[in-house]
Amino acid sequence: MHIESGNPQDAAATARPRIGRRALLSAGAVLAAGAGAATATAFGRNPGPAPAAAPPAPIPHHGARQSGLTYRQLPATRLLALDLPASVDREALRGLLAGLDKVLAAASDGSLADPRLAAAPISSLVAIGPALAARLKLDAPAELAELPAFPGDRLDEKRGGGDLLLQVSAEQPWTTGVLTEHLLAAAKPFGASSRWSQAGLLPPVPDGETPRNLFGFKDGSANPDPADPGLWHSDGTILVYRRIRMDSAAFTALPTDRQELAMGRRLASGAPLTGTAEHDDPDIYIKHPDGSYVIPADAHVRLSSPRLDGGARMLRRGYSYDDAPDDRGLLFCAFMRDPALFTRVQNRLAGNDALNPFLTHNASAVAWVLPGSQPGRPLGAAL
């Protein structure tokens, strides 16, 4: 940044030659033309304010699948877990889900009566935890189950689990916070209590580009097509959530080549070490002439490779979190047909991942993401 010293008017008078009125008018015309107002400026008229930008189109709330899975990730998110009293039966659960669905639908189409909520895109999802599904004997996917313990876990029970898991995403954190108030108000008559809440964010990236995590690497490069039938139970799926603290200061202090060997990808491009572009398929079997793997045996990309799981993939829609200078990291949110896939991957990672010295898993949850709602048929109507 350049800082002038002394009187700025005196400095300007001595440092710049005098500019005639004709030159000033000519320069003004050029600048105005560059702004799209050349004709009006030529006659000395003020073209007036630019037309107001059209408000962003709302995200449809109703559909076969919930909008939190079908729409692009929005920059701000909030996850909210609720516990329900033992007195809640299926009928009460249907009423609670219908109330939540009503709030989310109204927020999405702009009809929610709250002056704090400006018209803005909103996506959401609602999911049911394994304990509630078992307690009410719901017709949930047979694969829905709690995760086992993993080596190295440091789980805080107050930050994980829950009978219901809600997620709302928007362009601004303000919107997710206000919407959370309405969801809690809708749940209160059913005796629901807040178990935990977690805000997340994404760095700004151009449309179509993969966001980066707090280690600086692109996160989500090898995602499957969301239409992959291997992800779905009818139009529902299963969410695995992990809150992972990242020691980004220690990791980013490593030389770039060591970071890339630990990750198995290039820092700048996101390309696997065996490829040249971000979306090249990592080939975990290619070796150097000396017999060592190009993607090292302990690289994160190698240990999480779908090639080790018969090609099965999970759809990752994670966010970063920043709760304190010493508590920053990743909100890992992945969707899959069977959480046993995550269990296999995490067991490999927990035992050998080169990133382990820089990661701490401190919260966990699993939940059944319900199929979407329709007008006159709210979430959970078929439970």
Image (cartoon, rainbow, N blue to C red):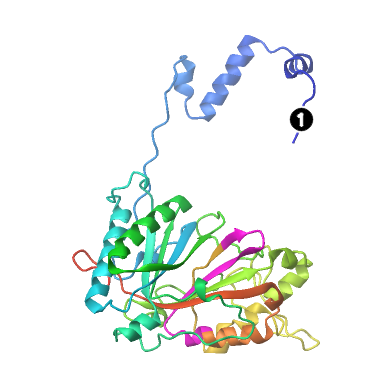
What residue is at 36 percent from the left and 61 percent from the top? 184
Could one spot residue 279 in this view of the protein?
Answer: yes
Quarter occupied by the C terminus: bottom left
Near-viewer residue (31 or 73): 73
Q: Which residues are magenta?
A: 321-342
Near-viewer residue (121 or 78): 78
The percent position of residue 350, horizontal first and vertical second, equals 63, 84
Q: Is residue 62 left or right of residue 83?
A: left
Q: Is residue 324 magenta?
A: yes
Prevailing secondary structure class for the magenta stretch in the rendered image: strand
Q: Compared to 11, does 286 lie above or below? A: below
Which residue, given by chain and number where applicable, does mark 1 sit on? 3
Q: Amino acid at mark 1?
A: Ile
Q: Quadrant of residue 15?
A: top right
Q: Is residue 338 left or right of residue 25?
A: left
What residue is at 60 percent from the left and 68 percent from the top? 278
Q: Compared to 55, does 294 lie above or below? A: below
What residue is at 38 percent from the left and 50 percent from the top? 120
Q: Is residue 301 magenta?
A: no
Could one spot residue 283 in this view of the protein?
Answer: no
Q: Quadrant of residue 1?
A: top right
Q: Is residue 153 left or right of residue 14?
A: left
Assign a secondary structure to mark 1: loop
The percent position of residue 354, horizontal first and vertical second, equals 71, 79
The percent position of residue 175, horizontal first and vertical second, equals 42, 52
Mark 1, Cα crowd under 10 Å, few <14 / some 14-19 / many 20+, is: few
What residue is at 37 percent from the left and 44 percent from the top? 55
Q: Compared to 122, does 376 lie above or below? A: below
Q: Is residue 113 left or right of residue 245?
A: left
